[in-house]
Structure formats: structure tokens, C-alpha cells
Image (cartoon, helix red, strand yellow):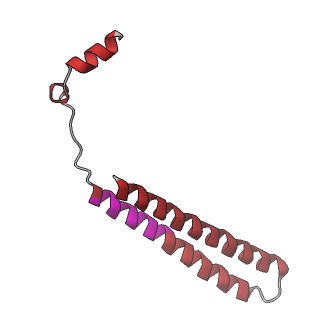
């Protein structure tokens, strides 16, 4: 064994006076729910606005293409956000 392992065995956690954070599992869940809720709401808002722009394009191919791309990107962002929320919820549930 080297000196680091020996020292690590001699020193206890209480001797180090490491402050413990007040972050609990429920606070993390609540914070992440709010963050992912905001991300989802923004994605839905972008989809609605892009849909209105698509309708307002009135046959203009460039305007319709911009609106279509915005809808696609917002849907992809919404899916990524939902998957991330599922993964984080699963991991937090295992802690």
C-alpha cells in the first residue's frame, strides 16, 4: 500500500469537517421538473408560433421552409427533453 491509502484509512469523515449540502432528492426532482417543464413549454410555444408562420407564409416557399424547419427542430427538442427527463427520473429513482 502507498501512503495515500494509509492516510485515507486513518482519517474519518467527521475529522475533516466537510460541510454537508442541504440538497435533498426531492429538491432535485422538483428543480428538474421545473426545468424540463419550462423546456417543454418553450418547445410547444415554438411549434405554435412556427405553425402560425407556416400558415401566414401563403405560398412563399422560403417562409414555409423556415417555419417547417422551426417545427422540426422544436419537435426534436421536445423529444430530446422528454427522453432526458425520463433518464434523469430513472437515475434519481435509483439513488
Q: Residue at x 15, y 29 (%)?
A: 14
The main secondary structure of the magenta stretch is helix
Q: Residue at x 66, y 68 (%)?
A: 73
Left or right: 6, with 76 as reference point = left
Check residue 33 for magenta coloring.
yes
Span of residues in magenta:
26-39
Please say if 87 is above or below 70. Answer: above
Check residue 75 for magenta coloring.
no
Left or right: 1, with 20 as reference point = right
Front one among 18 and 65:
18
Q: Residue furthest left?
A: 14
Left or right: 63, with 35 as reference point = right
Q: Quadrant of residue 10?
A: top left
Q: Residue at x 32, y 64 (%)?
A: 30
Please say if 54 is above or below 31. Answer: below
Q: Residue at x 72, y 77 (%)?
A: 67
The image shows residue 11 at horizontal and vertical percentages of 20, 21
Q: How many marks?
A: 0
Front one among 33 and 42:
33
Left or right: 56, with 8 as reference point = right
Front one among 67 and 44:
44
The image shows residue 57 at horizontal and vertical percentages of 76, 85
The image shows residue 37 at horizontal and vertical percentages of 44, 70
**Image quarter hosting the N terminus:** top left
Front one among 28 and 13:
13
Q: Quadrant of residue 62?
A: bottom right
Please say if 61 is above or below 34. Answer: below
The image shows residue 39 at horizontal and vertical percentages of 49, 67
Amino acid at each position: 500500500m502507498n501512503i495515500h491509502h494509509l492516510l485515507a484509512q486513518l482519517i474519518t469523515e467527521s475529522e475533516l469537517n466537510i460541510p454537508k449540502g442541504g440538497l435533498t432528492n426531492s429538491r432535485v426532482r422538483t428543480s428538474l421538473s421545473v426545468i424540463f417543464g419550462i423546456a417543454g413549454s418553450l418547445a410547444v410555444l415554438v411549434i405554435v408560433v412556427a405553425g402560425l408562420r407556416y400558415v401566414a407564409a401563403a405560398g412563399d416557399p422560403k417562409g414555409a421552409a423556415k417555419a417547417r424547419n422551426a417545427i422540426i427542430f422544436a419537435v426534436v427538442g421536445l423529444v430530446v427533453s422528454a427522453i432526458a427527463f425520463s433518464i434523469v427520473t430513472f437515475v434519481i429513482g435509483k439513488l
